[in-house]
Amino acid sequence: MLSAVLASGSLASHAAAPELPDPCPRPLPGSPVPEPRDLRSQNGVLDLDLSIRSHREADGTTRYCYMLPDGTQSPTLRLHPGDLLTLHLKNELTAAATAALQLRSDGRTSNTEAICRPKRKVSADPCTSGLMTATSTNLHFHGLTVPPRCHQDDVLRTSIQPTDPAFEYRFQVPRDEPPGLYWYHPHIHGFSTGQVEGGASGAMIIEGIERANPDLAGLPERVLVIRDQDLVNPNAPPSKSEPVVPKMLLDRDGDAANNGTGFGKPAKDLSINFVPVPYPDYPTATITMRPGERQLWRVLNASAVTYLNLAVLQQRAPQRLGVVAIDGVPIKTTAADSTAVTWVDHIGVPPGARVEFIVTGPPLGVPGLLVTRAVDTGQGGENDPNRALATLTAMADAPEPQSTLPASSEPLPASTRPWLGDVTPVRVRRLYFSEKLEDPSNPNSATTFFITVDGQTPAAFDPNSEVPNIVVKQGDVEDWIIENRSTELHAFHIHQLHFMLRDWSGVPVNEPFLRDTVNVPYYRANSLTYPSVRLRMDFRDPNTVGTFVYHCHLLEHEDGGMMGTIRVEPR
Ligand SMILES: [Cu+2]
């Protein structure tokens, strides 16, 4: 090193400080879709060190990166049911970078919550401090039925500061956890949007989906994480190839509002495995496949606020997608119907949700396209227009994805509990989503977001409250009817458990799989009733004992108060 310096001349000639390498490097638009690194459990244990870093970009946005010690970002954590996860999370967030959360270069705040400090005694203990600042962080393991306790999956009190040593997460994946796609992300109330939009998220796979569905044995598998982020070109007009749309309005969160046409400026840009696909021209990322090859695509919508409606096109014609699992839970098979594949030509994925489906590679010379179709989020919702994400190109020598499902294995043991749909609920509860403008005459004034148990007074989530909104006995199964009294779509999510969608606005659906996140349709000003979903909630698992949260998975709404607490008491 010294000889290199001497050879290049005098040290005094280095006037400017050397450029530091970008601590959160990301691929360029149009890049091949990279696969996240797989970290697999060995002998029943997956042990890793992970750091979270922040980096302020020239445009004023802040990136958040989960990093392994070697600089790999957002690895996929792969464990089998019954395996132990030990994860040491080091908070390396910097105040200078996160200051960008408060004010962007275009003058808008990208995270409207001020720094909140709980009134109760502040403790330095990361298990109890509950601190909510832009440099606080923690982890939620979305979808897993792991106890809501510190070091496992608690987000109400657990808060790790940059001054803390690496914090250990340590839990066993339940032996009966359904095999499928789960994920991890930070969950500090008031700051979830900024951290998740900045890129703090990663996939988790509970192995063995081919044991639930033998049709999948031997298939190459590809993990696709779709994230959203602030617009790269916020002031650009829409592409000339698009139909002309009404003048852009902003919604209550300051994002481009739904204009009802399926076109125009989106609320957020999307990326696919961190390859950005920015408005207005949507330069696609690229995926190569062998012609006609079947692959299992495991798709996570890790967006903070963007709904997806995925389709694969060939020459504009939608291709059949064989859906095998939603939210980590394989579609239920019975003896009479052993091939649990539901064929669709598009599939909706709310923020936080996952979908796993079989895709067939296009023939040689026929280009394919992965797109998200427009989602009608309601008059008060964000604009989620039609846009392309990735081109699919058939190549005879395309490299295979890095992971392939085992060619054969033992079928999963039958569940020890009756199917949720066959259990009679012990009670019915009613909840509703609603919003309140600070100035009712100004649709752009600040909005408070509520999720309220019917009969209680609507109140934004209060981190200081020790009184849960709902108390349940472990072992019970309940039906929850969740209404939407606002004019925008919301996505109901509850930690620690899955539920079954029974009715969709009064129409029975009785889905043969479970979810942990579901859309609740929006209210139209002229309708006589509020739209609702009816969910069968499963508190039978002893791991659900404790206090945890349910909320809207549009994180701007969650940060804005749309969250409540539930305590599951031991039987
Ligand atoms: Cu919402």
Image (tube, grey):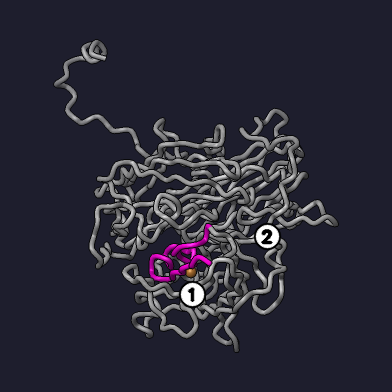
Q: Do the residues labelled 1 and 2 touch (CB within 8 Å)?
A: no
User: Residue at point 34% right, 67% down?
Assistant: 463
Q: In this view, does 210 lie above or below 547?
A: above
N-terminal of the pair, mark 1 or mark 2, is 1
Instruction: Give me the C-alpha separation between circle 1 and circle 2.
Output: 41 Å
Q: Residue furthest bottom?
A: 528
Q: Is residue 362 magenta?
A: no
User: Residue at point 43% right, 41% down?
Assistant: 87
Q: Quadrant of residue 516?
A: bottom right
* Image spot of residue 50 (x, y percent): 40, 39
Which of 335 and 416 lies nearest the eye of the viewer?
Answer: 416
| Marking on residue 417 | 2
Res 515 seen here: yes
Which of 281 and 414 lies nearest the eye of the viewer?
Answer: 414
| Marking on residue 380 | 1
**Crowd band around label 2 with a 10 angstrom C-alpha radius: few (<14), some (14–19), many (20+):** few
Magenta range is: 543-571
Q: Residue furthest left?
A: 12
User: Residue at point 31% right, 57% down?
Assistant: 128
Q: What element carries label 1?
A: loop
Which of 93 and 27 lies nearest the eye of the viewer?
Answer: 93
Give the residue type that dot 1 points to.
Gly
Q: Is mark 2 within 8 Å of ligand 1?
A: no
Q: How many marks?
A: 2
Give the residue type that dot 2 points to.
Arg
77 lies left or right of 120 = right
Q: In this view, does 553 lie above or below 20?
A: below
Q: Residue furthest right?
A: 336
Quarter of the image that includes the N terminus: top left
